[in-house]
Amino acid sequence: MSEPTYPAGTLSSPTPVLSVAPVVLPAPSRALDLEVRVSAPVTGSDLPVVLLSHGQGYSNNLSSLNGYAPLANFWAAHGFVVIQPTHLSSTTLSLPPETPGAPLHWRSRAEDMTRVLDQLDAVEAAVPGLLGRLDRSRVAVAGHSMGGHTASLLLGARLTDPHDGTEVNLAEPRIKAGVLLATTGGGGNALTESVAENFPFLLTTDFSKMATPTLVVAGDKDTSTHLTVRGPSWHVDPYVLSPGPKSLLTLFDAEHGLGGVSGYDVAETTDENPGRVAAIQRLTWAYLRTELYPGDSAWESAREELAAGPDPLGRVESKA
């Protein structure tokens, strides 16, 4: 295996990115075949992979393979291959409400990511110049909001299926690290009455077996009153309630959009802050670099950089 593209701890100049969409992956058991966007640096070999799961915002196209360009473009420009599915919950698909798994298709969303990993040969072949350049031993998952819930299941979180009462385990052993952005927290009485009634799968979320290394990113002003009665602390549950190793990035004055991670100049971002987005880009990249390349000092350097300024945008804590 060749040496990593980036020397330990460094963030070099961005590389031009090739983005191809839709790449269509056959999915006979799914309501529709799976469409993904693949973004990759035009140079480099043995490239690590990030699976990026979209949330459920008000805008149509953000909740699809067309969203989250600030993250996908940055990660790809700095050495990752980013694969973004359009989950069945996306409003761009206009599926009828009686489609099995509707409205949020929580199980199918996680299965989409496993399906992508099962078909990496097809992904490589569909993107010009990508064949043979993936490092399949270095795979991470990331997700924002509902996408964070999807990612947490792949990282080892459990829930009870509200239809049959069985414990659901969708942990994906090929995934070595994760990033959860403004993600969902614990269930029970933390949820609003509306969420508990309409999305009962959220009632039983259990992080006690989510053992895969994960960075949880939360805004200290993310009240998410449409989801929880607990306020910003709810989004910290995946860090508090899971075993280590975990890290928590708390962003000061950040709301659910975390400054604008879901897209460029998105009207539904209530806390637009390009500096905050830049910090998230840098810190998430550094975290994944260090987790996927043990011994790499990128995460340590990024943490030091965050804390060194006179007016830091956030703070980081970790547990072993």
Image (spheres, rainbow, N blue to C red):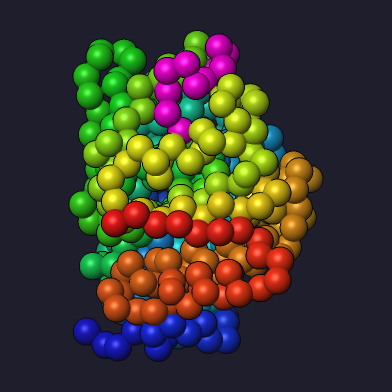
Task: Answer with left or right where residue 171 lies relative to residue 177.
Answer: left
Residue nearest the viewer, comparing 76 with 301: 301
**Quadrant in the picture for the C terminus:** bottom left
**Image height check: is 289 above or below 179?**
below
Q: Residue at x 66, y 61 (%)?
A: 313
Q: Residue at x 32, y 30 (%)?
A: 206
Looking at the rendering, which quadrant does residue 94 occupy? top right
Q: Is residue 45 magenta?
A: no
Q: Residue at x 55, y 12 (%)?
A: 193
Q: Residue at x 28, y 45 (%)?
A: 243
User: Residue 18, position in %: x, y?
Assistant: 53, 73
Q: Is residue 194 magenta?
A: yes
Bounds of the magenta span? 185-195
**Image height check: is 286 above or below 183?**
below
Residue nearest the viewer, comparing 118 with 11: 11
Q: How many marks?
A: 0
Residue nearest the viewer, comparing 76 with 9: 9
Residue nearest the viewer, comparing 37 with 320: 320
Q: Is residue 308 visible?
A: yes
User: Residue 75, position in %: x, y?
Assistant: 51, 69
Task: Answer with left or right where residue 305 lies relative to residue 4.
Answer: right
Looking at the rendering, which quadrant does residue 17 occupy? bottom right
Q: Is residue 60 visible?
A: no
User: Residue 28, position in %: x, y?
Assistant: 30, 37
**Quadrant in the picture for the N terminus:** bottom left
**Image height check: is 301 above or below 57?**
below
User: Residue 56, position in %: x, y?
Assistant: 58, 36
Looking at the rendering, which quadrant does residue 80 occupy? bottom left
Task: Answer with left or right where residue 251 lies relative to residue 95.
Answer: right
